[in-house]
Amino acid sequence: MNHVFEIIDKSGRNIRLTKEQWRHIKQDHLEIVDELSIKETLESPTKITQPYKGTKYYYYKYNNG
């Protein structure tokens, strides 16, 4: 299996987190602690942006506290 998980995001898109992407996240984004926080952000984001034309989207989830 080449992916860590597959999920349907808030807008109905099918999102697949690959092992390569997961390695990048663990190395470069230390604020993300586990897969569950990524899934929660994809399913229930505070904000989704698409800063450039194409297929890349940025998902944000702001925590109170």
Image (spheres, helix red, strand yellow):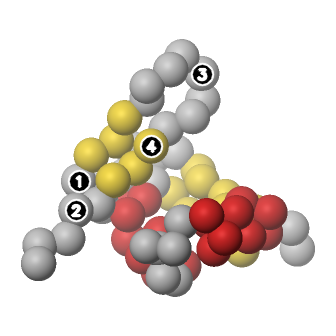
Residue 26 vs residue 5, the one in the foreground: 26
How far across and down, in percent of the image, does residue 30 sit? 51, 74
Q: Earlier in the sequence, mark 4 or mark 1?
A: 1
Q: Position of residue 38 (x, y in %)?
A: 47, 69
Check disc 3 and give the amino acid type.
Answer: Gly
Residue type at mark 2 is Tyr
The picture quadrant where one finds residue 6 is: bottom right
Earlier in the chain: of badge 1 and badge 3, it is 1
Task: Using residue 8 as the reference point, say whether residue 60 is left or right of it.
Answer: left
Helix or strand or loop: what does disc 2 sit on? Answer: loop
Q: Which residue is mark 4?
A: 58
Identity of the amino acid at label 1? Thr
- State yes or no: discs 1 and 3 in contact (Cβ < 8 Å): no
Left or right: 41, with 3 as reference point = left
Q: Which mark is residue 46?
A: 1
What secondary structure is marked by label 3? loop
Identify the residue position indicated by label 2 in the image: 62
Q: Which mark is residue 15?
A: none
Residue 54 got which mark? 3
